[in-house]
Amino acid sequence: MPATFSFVERRVWRVLRITLWWLAAGLIFAVWESNTLEDHGHDPERLATMDHQLRRFLLIGFIGANVYIFLLRRHLRRMAYLTASGFMIALVAMILVLATVLDAGNAGGTFADAIRARLISWRFVGEFLLWGILAIATMSLVRLNDQFGTGARSFLLGRYFKPRQELRIFMFLDMRSSTTIAEEIGDTRYFQLLNEVYADITDPVTNHAGDIYQYVGDEISVSWPLRQGVRGQRCLKCFFAIREKLRKRAAHYHQRYGFSPVFKAGLHYGQVTTGEIGLVKRQTIYSGDVVNTVARIQSTCNVHGVDNLVSKDLLDVLLPPAGSWSVRPIGEVPLKGKRNAVMLYTVEPK
């Protein structure tokens, strides 16, 4: 398995998963239609009907998944849910009307009468309801997956319903000069800036298998299970991918807000207790000394004039390949709330 997943690779996997969902829905629909035909004495047509429906769902699911993931998702996820749902329903209606118009050309009688007869038929209503429900369900599942991030599977399987201890890597990111920027551009535009920045940061994080734990103002917490974060130095590469993405977008931010966001980061790992908490708005939280420590590490970046600090504990398990990284020791740094000083390094790709 590669250490990182490219933009295209992740979306191809999503397309395949959505296609499988549609194929499963097609199987259910085909079985239902087959049983209906049997009840009405059309038994010889059952297998042909099932085969036709499965092929239809597979083809439409594959094409629809590609259109949604590669073309529509980026725009729809910035819309309110009801607005996005309305767009999907309108798109389904438009496609069905277009298909009806094209098919009407093969019918007898006048062209207008053929179209009118199809559009007011129960068959058209049934097709609209079927494909509309499937389109909304697909969009909802993708949005839920975005909402829960990489922890969606763990949440659905109840992995952390009971607390468990595990080793995790944490990266705390904080935007430099955030107070000054907020004062200069005002609260509303500052919120818009954060929203854009977080959208830009999302792909570098997910490409490196990171889980966005929480947003706290202009701070972002990213986490990995130890094995996932260590593989291919994902946690380090994630920070530099974020930095590079924001550098490429600097001109856009300067033009729109008069500032370009720059982040500093602290990275550390250790044992935490992970579990779900709350009855309403239930979420997974991490509890342990490592969470406090990584926050303190990040807060000392300005003191040492660097944009990243990595603990010796984490660097020892990362084992960065010689020649790939420039590692500079900062020294043993006392951190608030810690009895012993922590050895810190700053890292740069060569």
Image (cartoon, helix red, strand yellow):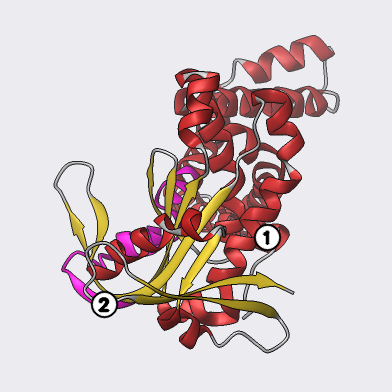
Give the quadrant of the C terminus: bottom right
Visible in this render: residue 42?
A: yes
Q: Quadrant of residue 161?
A: bottom left
Mark 2 sits on what residue? 340
Whether 159 is among the magenta residues is yes
Mark 2 secondary-structure assignment:
loop
- For badge 2, the amino acid type reads Asn
Question: Between 106 and 304, which is closer to the camera in this rendering?
Answer: 304
Q: Which residues are magenta?
A: 143-167
Residue 252 location (% of width, % of height): 73, 32
Residue 276 location (% of width, % of height): 21, 58
Q: Quadrant of residue 319?
A: bottom right
Q: Nearer the viewer, mark 1 or mark 2?
A: 2
Visible in this render: residue 17?
A: no
Report whether 165 appears left or right of 319: left
- Image point (49%, 36%), residue name: 178
Residue 259 location (% of width, % of height): 64, 31
Q: Of the residues under marks 1 and 2, which one precedes in the sequence? A: 1
Give the quadrant of the N terminus: bottom right
- Image point (51%, 80%), residue name: 230
Report whether 12 appears left or right of 286: right
- Image point (64%, 54%), residue name: 243
Mark 1 sits on what residue? 12
Report whether 3 appears left or right of 109: left
